[in-house]
């Protein structure tokens, strides 16, 4: 696996998080009756309402009003330089938007600063795996969620997937950064902006002639996508026998719990622990998965971008295909029409456990996590530069659906 490089893994974290981190809607086989216990949530109460029919009562009317009033272009301009968690909101924002954002940017009362700091250290040591799992794995799971694939394809971002991937990568990298929720970080900023984007898509996409479903991005839809990220990643880390302490796994869950809250998922639906997360994932994820033409097309675009980003001219598309198939399994890979490769598929399957063991033998060495993080961060910056062609790119609110 000489051609399989660290840059391949890091590119996965940016290029293929496009569908995972934004929490678009999903729909596939008939959904099961909602039976998940609200006592298993961080709120401990509530949650009786089926989340398929719950959206975002705070953000939705704000984005709709901004769009209807024609305020979005000016708002995007004003928010362009709002980049730090501790930064005051810019002057000139509409009053209703300002009031919403001041409340939306607050961490929940149950947020634990110590756990958020522990999560940053966990990301430093395990970023190699997490970028791979949240990127390639979560991305390929998401293209196999029909409602999500359709919403991505027919919303504005579907017309320019490099731009879409870049903007999604901004949020994904923010969650995994060392200062994600510190004052000088930007995870709060990017989560709140993403929440407004979701609300705008809910307003715009039903106006598209291509959209035939219910209002997109329900609480169920967001939970489905959420589980393709932390829940899927934690299950894979355990499957690969990556040694984790209870404190590390709890901290990793916590950073995603806080992020879920800031993205507009109601506390009564956010799992309180890993057992609750896995039970909820088992209920909502399988019924919402399946194949679509749009999902297949998006998969092809995203894997093509990954092959080009990681090492043009040396990392072959068959290797990228084999890696994606290894991560998500044959059923999802078949839905996404990821080709089987007779050479790379068995090679990755045989070599990956050995690679994990080798890397785990190095993690405890002095300065290894710091060096690994420096390399990961350099690769992240390369990915964003590649996707944006060197242009400054930030999350902004859309005003239209896919124009074609």
Image: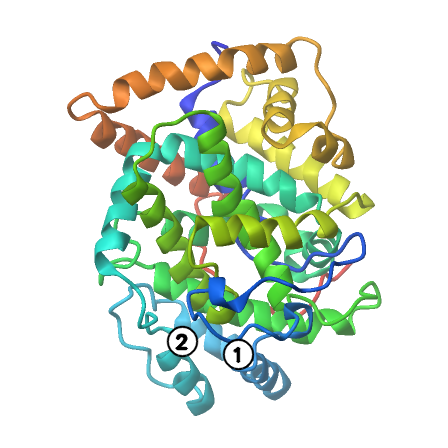
Secondary structure at badge 1 equals helix
Residue shown at the point (80%, 66%) measured from the top left = 213
Label 2 and label 1: CA atoms lie apart by 9 Å
> Could you tell me if residue 370 is visible in this image?
yes
The residue tagged 2 is: 104
> Could you tell me if residue 396 is visible in this image?
no
The residue tagged 1 is: 59
The numbered mark at residue 22 is none
Q: 10 Å neighbourhood of mark 2: few (<14), some, or many (≥20)?
A: many
Question: On the picture, is 293 further left or further right than 81?
Answer: right
Classify 371 as above or below 285.
Answer: above
Q: How many labels, in total?
A: 2
Residue 134, percent from left and from top = 50, 41
Instruction: Determine the image quadrant of residue 109.
Output: bottom left
Q: 10 Å neighbourhood of mark 1: few (<14), some, or many (≥20)?
A: many
> Which quadrant of the rendered structure holds the C terminus?
bottom right
Chain-order first, disc 2 or disc 1: 1
Residue 57, percent from left and from top = 56, 81
Classify 46 as above or below 136.
Answer: below
Classify 207 as above or below 180.
Answer: below
């Amino acid at each position: 696996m000489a051609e399989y490089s660290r840059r391949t893994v890091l590119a996965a974290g940016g290029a293929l998080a496009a569908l995972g981190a934004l929490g678009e809607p999903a729909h596939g086989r008939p959904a099961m009756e909602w039976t998940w216990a609200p006592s298993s949530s961080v709120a401990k109460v509530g949650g009786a309402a089926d989340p398929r029919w719950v959206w975002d009562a705070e953000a939705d009317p704000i984005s709709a009003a901004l769009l209807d009033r024609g305020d979005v272009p000016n708002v995007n301009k004003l928010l362009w330089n709002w980049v730090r968690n501790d930064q005051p909101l810019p002057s000139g924002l509409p009053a209703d938007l300002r009031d919403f954002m001041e409340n939306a940017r607050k961490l929940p009362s149950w947020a634990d600063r110590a756990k958020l700091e522990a999560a940053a250290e966990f990301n430093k040591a395990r970023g190699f795996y997490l970028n791979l799992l949240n990127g390639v794995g979560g991305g390929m799971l998401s293209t196999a969620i029909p409602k999500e694939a359709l919403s991505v394809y027919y919303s504005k971002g579907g017309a320019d997937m490099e731009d879409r991937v870049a903007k999604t990568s901004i949020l994904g990298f923010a969650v995994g950064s060392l200062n994600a929720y510190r004052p000088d970080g930007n995870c709060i900023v990017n989560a709140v902006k993403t929440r407004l984007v979701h609300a705008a898509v809910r307003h715009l996409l039903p106006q598209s002639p291509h959209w035939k479903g219910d209002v997109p991005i329900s609480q169920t839809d967001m939970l489905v996508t959420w589980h393709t990220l932390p829940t899927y990643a934690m299950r894979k880390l355990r499957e690969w026998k990556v040694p984790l302490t209870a404190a590390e796994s709890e901290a990793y869950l916590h950073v995603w719990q806080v992020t879920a809250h800031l993205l507009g998922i109601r506390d009564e639906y956010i799992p309180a622990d890993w057992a609750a997360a896995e039970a909820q994932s088992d209920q909502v994820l399988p019924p919402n998965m399946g194949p679509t033409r749009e999902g297949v097309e998006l998969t092809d675009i995203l894997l093509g971008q990954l092959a080009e980003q990681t090492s043009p001219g040396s990392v072959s598309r068959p290797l990228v295909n084999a890696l994606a198939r290894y991560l998500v399994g044959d059923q999802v890979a078949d839905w996404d029409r990821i080709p089987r490769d007779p050479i790379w598929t068995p090679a990755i399957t045989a070599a990956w456990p050995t690679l994990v063991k080798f890397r785990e033998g190095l993690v405890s060495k002095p300065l290894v996590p710091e060096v690994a993080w420096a390399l990961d961060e350099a690769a992240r910056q390369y990915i964003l530069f590649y996707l944006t062609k060197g242009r400054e790119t930030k999350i902004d609110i859309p005003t239209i659906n896919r124009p074609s």
